[in-house]
Image (cartoon, helix red, strand yellow):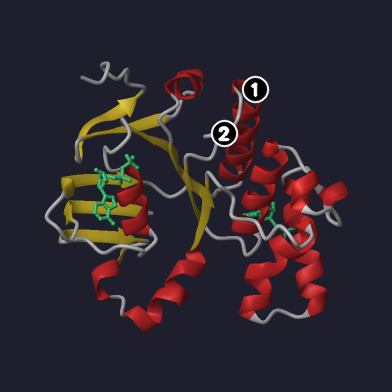
Amino acid sequence: MIRFEQVSKTYPGGFKALEKVSFEVAKGEMAFLTGHSGAGKSTLLKLISMIERPSIGNVFINDKNLNLITPSQVPYARRDIGMIFQNHRLLQEHTVFDNVALPLVIEGYTQGEIAKRVHAALDKVGLLDKAKCLPKILSGGEQQRVGIARAVVNKPPLLLADEPTGNLDPELSKEIINVFQQFNDVGVSVLIATHDLGLIARMRNRTLTLKQGRMINDGLQQSLQPEN
Ligand code: ADP
Ligand code: ADP
């Protein structure tokens, strides 16, 4: 599903955020991406979602080399990827339904199809009864689930999450991860960037670890040394 081949990313100004990173995430796999703040987790996710481009090396999604995708093709290629952020970036003046519907409205779906898909997505994250609410009356965990519903509403085969539990207590964090697990159970590939080692320790997923831009571990759980 995801393949990095010797990928380096140097930002303008010369900062090396990633260096010679290689790994694969198989179709249907759910993995964590961890490392201290500044290790390069967000950069790695941005290369997958084509927000940034590699300086050297190749990124493949579904065996398609992203270097060969032209800027005008990027929006189409992104349809295969659902993105979830720590700050769910919800439109506060619009209902939960409208927030989740947004990607489908942009794609020009019919009203009937939109209603059907939004209800299916809200059902999957357990928020069907909140469809008519404004986001601000929801709890942090519920708002995050709205963000997840919006990311999955067009059924992408790959979900990327950047610190999805950043603002949540351990119990709510576990609930959010369980939502991802449910999508993974039906075949969706999931990559979750997090520095929440307690959360990772409670799961039995593969964990990719970045340190100063290098992939230092690719296995089942890894304890990070204290930052020095
Ligand atoms: P993480 O998600 O692990 O905290 P990031 O990928 O956000 O790490 O950042 C890795 C490093 O790259 C950081 O030192 C950060 O300051 C730097 N960086 C991130 N984005 C940019 C940018 N647009 N321009 C310059 N440096 C950046
Ligand atoms: P339809 O609208 O075509 O009837 P559903 O919404 O009922 O489809 O979903 C059909 C199946 O696809 C469900 O079992 C659902 O869990 C699964 N599925 C596969 N990939 C995804 C995804 N990325 N997001 C949501 N559901 C998905």
Tag 1 near tag 2, CB within 8 Å: no
> Badge 1: how crowded within 10 Å, few (<14), some, or many (20+)?
few
Identify the secondary structure beneath mark 1: helix
- Residue 64 horizontal side relative to residue 172, left or right: left
Q: Please, is residue 100 above or below residue 30 in the view?
A: below
Q: Which residue is mark 1?
A: 171
Type of amino acid under label 1: Glu
Which quadrant, please, contains the N terminus? bottom left
Q: Secondary structure at mark 2?
A: loop
Q: Residue 37 is drawn in which quadrant?
A: top left
- Give the residue displayed 75% in from the left and 48% down from the top: 136
Percent of width and height locating residue 22: 20, 46
Q: Residue at x 62, y 78 (%)?
A: 107
Q: What residue do we see at 58% from left, 34% from top?
A: 177
Q: Is residue 77 left or right of residue 15?
A: right
Q: Position of residue 23 (x, y in %)?
A: 25, 44
- Residue shown at 74% from the left, 37% from the top: 139
Instruction: Respond yes or no on whether mark 2 lies under 8 Å from ligand 1.
Output: no
Q: Tell me the tag on residue 167.
A: 2
Left or right, residue 136 beside residue 67: right
Q: Is residue 40 left or right of residue 105?
A: left
Q: Nearer the viewer, residue 189 or 70?
A: 70
Q: Position of residue 71 (x, y in %)?
A: 34, 79
Residue 154: quadrant of the picture: bottom right
Q: Amino acid at mark 2?
A: Asn
Q: Quadrant of the C terminus?
A: top left
